[in-house]
């Protein structure tokens, strides 16, 4: 494949991600006053149950510092709480509050609806499965190519 073809694929992938993020974010903000940047960690907390900032950061592939700031914002809005971690006094365990659970329940329906509009209604189930498998393959390959801290030095 030529470099120009790879560049076009890169452009399409990045622009599509940006457009999809913006559309989903706008809908969540309008209908639930919940930015996608907070919805995503709330989904992780819900899926993992009681978890650490590190667990959320790893699931979202972002820094621990950035994740901690996101959790601070979610906590200040009353949608999650931190409790001391009995297994490690240096960290906290995070869980959704009842208010956070209710907001997430309502927001998930909106999120799923918007993804259906923008992905499910456009691609056949088989095409969507292939697309998902391709993205998973690319993410896995990318992780194996990302240099470690020692390699960067």
Image (spheres, grey):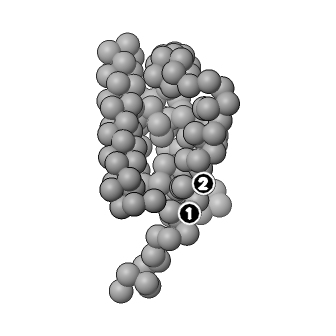
Determine the residue positioned at 63% across, 45% down.
133
Q: Residues within 10 Å of mark 1 (few under 14, many from 20)?
A: few
Q: Residue at x 56, y 63 (%)?
A: 141
- State if disc 1 and disc 2 touch (CB < 8 Å): yes
Q: Which residue is mark 2?
A: 137
Q: Looking at this view, is 148 or 94 the one in front?
A: 148
Q: Cα distance, mark 2 to mark 1? A: 6 Å
Q: Do we see residue 153 in this rendering?
A: yes
Where is residue 69? Give x, y as percent: 34, 48
Judging depth in this view, the residue of 45 and 85 nearest the camera is 45
Q: How many marks?
A: 2
In the image, which disc is placed on residue 21?
none
Quadrant (top left, top right, bottom left, bottom right) of the C terminus: bottom left
Q: Secondary structure at mark 1?
A: helix
List x then y, in percent, for residue 145.
Answer: 50, 71
The reply to whether residue 35 is in sight is no
């Amino acid at each position: 494949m030529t470099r120009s073809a790879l560049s076009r694929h890169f452009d399409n992938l990045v622009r599509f991600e940006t457009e999809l993020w913006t559309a989903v974010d706008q809908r969540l903000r309008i209908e639930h006053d919940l930015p996608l940047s907070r919805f995503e960690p709330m989904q992780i907390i819900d899926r993992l149950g009681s978890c650490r900032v590190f667990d959320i950061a790893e699931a979202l592939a972002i820094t621990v510092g950035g994740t901690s700031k996101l959790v601070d914002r979610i906590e200040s809005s009353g949608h999650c709480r931190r409790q001391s971690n009995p297994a490690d006094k240096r960290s906290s365990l995070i869980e959704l509050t009842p208010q956070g659970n209710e907001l997430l329940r309502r927001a998930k329906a909106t999120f799923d609806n918007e993804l259906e509009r923008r992905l499910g209604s456009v691609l056949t189930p088989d095409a969507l499965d292939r697309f998902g498998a391709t993205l998973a393959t690319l993410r896995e390959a990318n992780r194996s190519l990302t240099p470690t801290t020692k390699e960067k030095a």
